Amino acid sequence: MLGTAFQLVSVMAMFAAQVLGLGSMLGTERLWPLVLGIVVVPALLQLSLGYLLVESPRWLCMVGNVEEARHTLVTLRDADPEDDAIVEEMEVMLQSAQAAKKSGKGGATFSQLLKAPTAYPLFISVCLMAVQQFSGINNAFNFSSVFLKANGMDDAAVQLIAILMNVGNVMITLLSVYLMDRAGRRVLLLMSSWGMFLAALMLTVALKSPGRTFTTPLSVLSVVLFVSAFGIGLGPVAWLLPAEIMPGETRALASSVAATTNWLANFIATQAFLVIANMLGGFAFVPFAVCLFVGSFFIAAFVPETKGKSLEQIQSELAR
């Protein structure tokens, strides 16, 4: 559940930014600079709460500060130092630190990422990050107003629908928090990819049927479904899974590679969209639908279910 906090806070911030940008709020000719300046508030809040941050117990073990690592772990887990879970976790981290020292490496290296047991989990994580962004989600957010206006909707209606999209995104992400440890990560990913695939096809039908009686409601329904399906699976799980399947000794570096892949794919998908739209017109979302179709089979074939499993169980399954 905690692993979905990143996505939940992100979509809540997107919703807040959109509301503040409304013409009835700060989106006016005189007040719009405040929309840009208000980002100082969360930045200052983050700086003021910096004293609550602690060093990673695993890193402290790596540099030999075992007692500080134990104290930090006890604080994070809110448990007794003699608790069996604390003792076991400390043993695992110390063994990992000793293994790293014996190999003569103070931390993970890029060459380790290409070897077992990291290579396969990294392959899954990188591909999942690519599927997330090549689903076209950011293009749906960034260009949905263009689609809706092209289908005869006025500015007020488009603005209302954009707000409802973000409200739905927040609500569906909250639902995914509830379902994450009940339905399972893999199930949510499959539901998400197939739901977005269906929505992309519906949007394509709407874009290729201008002026028809069903065009406007189908456009609205497809965009809302697209965003909602993303929020229940591909949105939160793609960020959660790397931390669950990566080996402890390479987790930080491997996760950073996965995150870099996400932002690189984000950049490519966003920059390419207008070129694709100019070339394909109403079929602009077909390439993204193809990515989702292929991605759903990738998820079914390669992504493990991690719900209720220890790292050792997950690693054992991935090694088969």
Image (spheres, rainbow, N blue to C red):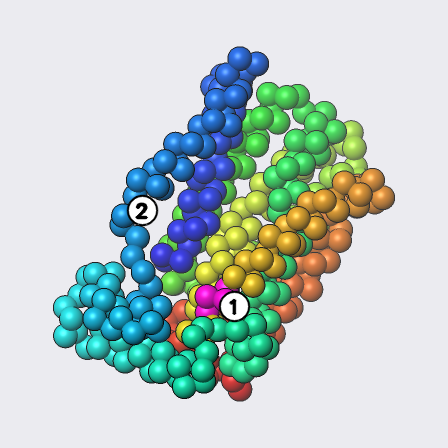
Q: Amino acid at mark 1?
A: Ala
Q: Amino acid at mark 2?
A: Gly
On the rendered structure, is 93 left or right of 8? left
Magenta stretch, residue numbers: 251-255
Tag 1: Cα neighbours inside 10 Å, few (<14), some, or many (≥20)?
Answer: many
Of the two numbered discs 2 and 1 in the rendering, the one whose residue sits closer to the viewer = 2
> At 68% from the left edge and 61% from the top edge, which residue is drawn?
293
Q: Work out whether residue 176 or residue 76 is closer to the camera in this orientation and state it.
A: 76
> At 70% from the left edge and 50% from the top edge, which residue is drawn?
268
Mark earlier in primary sequence (2, 1): 2
Distance CA(mark 2)–CA(mark 1): 25 Å
Corner quadrant of residue 284:
top right
Q: Position of residue 19 (x, y in %)?
A: 48, 27
User: Residue 69 in magenta?
Assistant: no
Whether 267 is drawn above or below 238: the answer is: above
On the rendered structure, is 236 left or right of 312? right
Tag 2: Cα neighbours inside 10 Å, few (<14), some, or many (≥20)?
Answer: few
Callout 2: helix, strand or loop? helix
Q: Position of residue 124 (x, y in %)?
A: 57, 70
Callout 1: helix, strand or loop? helix
Whether 89 is drawn above or below 231: the answer is: below
> At 52% from the left edge and 53% from the top edge, which residue is drawn?
235
Q: Which residue is mark 2?
A: 50
- Verify CB contact (< 8 Å) between mark 2 and mark 1: no
> At 75% from the left edge and 46% from the top edge, which residue is drawn?
272
Q: Which residue is mark 1?
A: 254
